[in-house]
Amino acid sequence: MTAGLWEHWVLPGIWITVQLTLYSAALATAVAFGVGMARTHRSRLVRFFAAFYTEVFRGTSALVLMFWIFFVLPQLAGWALVPMWAAVLALGLSYGAYGAEVVRGALNAVAPAQREAGVALSFTPWQRMRLILLPQAVPEMIPSFCNLLVELLKGTALVSLLGIGDVSFAAYLVRLATTESAQIYSITLIIYFVLAFLLTRGMKVLERRAKAGIGQFPEPLSTGGWLRFRRSDAKSPELSSTGVTGGGASR
Amino acid sequence: MSADTPLSKERPNPAVDGSELIRFDRVVKRFGANTVLDELDFSVASGKHVTLIGPSGSGKTTILRLLMTLIKPDEGTIKVGGAYLTHEEKNGRLVPAGEKHVREVRKNIGMVFQQFNLFPNMKVLRNITEAPVTVLGLPKDEAEQRARDLLDLVGLGDKCDAYPTQLSGGQQQRVAIARALAMRPQVLLLDEVTSALDPELVAGVLDVLRDIAHTTDITMLCVTHEMNFARDISDQVLMFDAGRVIESGPPEKIFSDPEHERTREFLSAVL
Ligand SMILES: Nc1ncnc2c1ncn2[C@@H]1O[C@H](COP(=O)(O)OP(=O)(O)OP(=O)(O)O)[C@@H](O)[C@H]1O
Ligand SMILES: [Mg+2]
C-alpha cells in the first residue's frame, strides 16, 4: 500500500472511527442510565415510557435508523444533521437501548435489603439511587458495557454507507485504488482488533477500580505478562477476611 | 446521662415520662389470603424496652416492618410520637400519608436488621455519617465526630476506614447498631439481630445492646430468641400468637410464671 493512501485515508479513518465510537458511547451511556433508571421508577407511567423506548430502539436496526435520521428527518424537521452527527445519534440511541437493559438488570440485582436499609435511614428515593443503588450496580454493569462498547465499535462501520470516511470506508477506497483487497482488508481487521483490545483492557481497569470502590478486590489481571496496567491507587486492603488482596501482579 | 455522650439528644426527648410513643390501633395486615395481623392493638411507652416473643410466623417481623414503613397495613392506624405513621390528617380527615410525611415521622425510628445490611460501597465511617449528613443536614465534621464516638461505644473505634466486607459478622452488626443510633431515633427496632451470627460473636453484640439499653433513654422494640438477653433488658415482654398479643407483662412474670398455655409451650420449646 502506498504511503499516500495510508496518510490520507487510513489514518484519518482510524481517527474518525475512534471519534464515532467515543461520541456514540457517551450518548449511549447517557441514554442507558436515563432509560434504565426510569425502568425501575415507582411511577408506572415512567416505567411504561422507558420500556417503550427500549422496545422501539432495540427493535429497529441501527442502520435503518441512521438512514432515517439522515434522509427522512430533514424532510420532516426542515433541518439536517451532518452525516457524522446523524450517525452518532443513531448509534447512541440504539446502543443506549441495549445499555438501558444492562442498567436495569444491574439495579434490580442489588439486594432488596439495601433499599430497605436506605428507607430505614430516611433517604429519599433519589438519594437511595445515588448513594446506595448506583454505586453498587455500576461495577456489575461494566462487563456488559464492555461487550456493548466493542459491538458499538464494530457497528460504526455502518457509517461508511453514509460516505463518512471511517476505517471501513478508507479500506473500501484503498481497495478501489489498489485492487489489493486481501492486504487492505487484513489490515482493517487488525485495526479493529487492536481498537477493541484497547477498549476491553481499558474497561477491565475501570471494572477493577469500580469493584475496589465497593470493597471487592478481585484476582489480579492476567495480561499474559506483556501488557500491564498499574492500579494508580494501589491501596491494598488490610485485613481482607477472604484473604484475597488486589494488585499482586501489577507490582 | 451527660450531655456529651454519643447518645445524648439535642432535641429534648418528650419521652422519658412514660407517655405513649407507639400505638397500633386495630392493625390488620394480610399477605394474600394469609391474615398475619388481625386487628392488633398494642402500645409502647416511651423509654421502655419491649421484647416481642412468639412462634415462627406469628408476625413479629411484620410488626417491625410496619413500623419501619417497609410495608403498609391493610387496615387500622399506627402512631409514633403522636403522629400518624401511615396517614395524614387533612381537613380533619385521615388520608393515606404522602412520601414526605412518612419520611418525617420515620426519622424518629431506627432499625437494625438480622443481616446487618451495611452499604458495601461505603467505608464504615461513611456508612454511619451519610444519613445524618444527607437526611438530617448535620455538618460533616459533627457527623464524623458523632460516628467516631459511636464506634468507640460499640468497640470498633479502629475500623473507620474498613469496608464492611472486611469485617466479621459481629463487627458488621455493631456498625449497623452505630449507624442506626447516629440518627438519634426515639425508637430502635431490633429484629433478631444476632441470629445470623456465629455463636461466638453473639455475646459481643448483645453486650453492646445491653449497654445501650441501660445507659440511654431510647425506646427499644426487639424481637429475639435470646431469652436471657430479653430478661436482662426488657421492661415488658409481649407474647404473640396468630397475629395477636396473647400475654404481656414484665419478664420475671412471663418467663417464670406465664398464664397462657401457649406461652408455656413456646417457652418450654425455646428455653
Ligand atoms: N412479603 C411477604 N409475602 C407473603 N407472606 C409473608 C411476607 N412476609 C411475611 N409473610 C408471612 O407472614 C407471616 C408472619 O411472618 P413474620 O416474618 O412476621 O413472622 P415472624 O414472627 O417474624 O417469624 P420468625 O420468628 O420466623 O421470624 C408468615 O406466615 C409469613 O409467611
Ligand atoms: Mg421474623
Image (cartoon, helix red, strand yellow):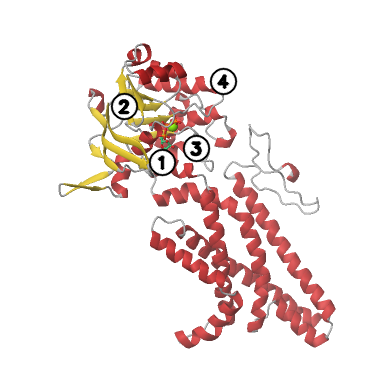
Determine the secondary structure under disc 3.
loop
B70 left or right of A96 in image: left
User: Which residue extends farthest left?
Assistant: B92
User: Same chain, marks 4 and 1?
Assistant: yes
Q: CA distance from mark 1 to mark 2?
A: 34 Å
Label 1 lies in what chain?
B
In the image, residue B106 sits, relative to residue B48, either above or below, namely below
Q: Which mark is residue B118?
A: 3
Q: Is residue B7 visible?
A: no
In the image, residue A1 sits, relative to residue A231, either above or below, namely below
Amino acid on which disc 1 is placed: Ala
The quadrant the N terminus of chain A occupies is bottom right
- Binning the other alpha carbons within 10 Å of mark 4 as few (below 14), some (14 to 19) or many (20 upward) gives few
Label 4 lies in what chain?
B
Ligand 1 shows up in which quadrant of the image? top left
User: Same chain, marks 3 and 4?
Assistant: yes
- Label 4 belongs to which residue? B200
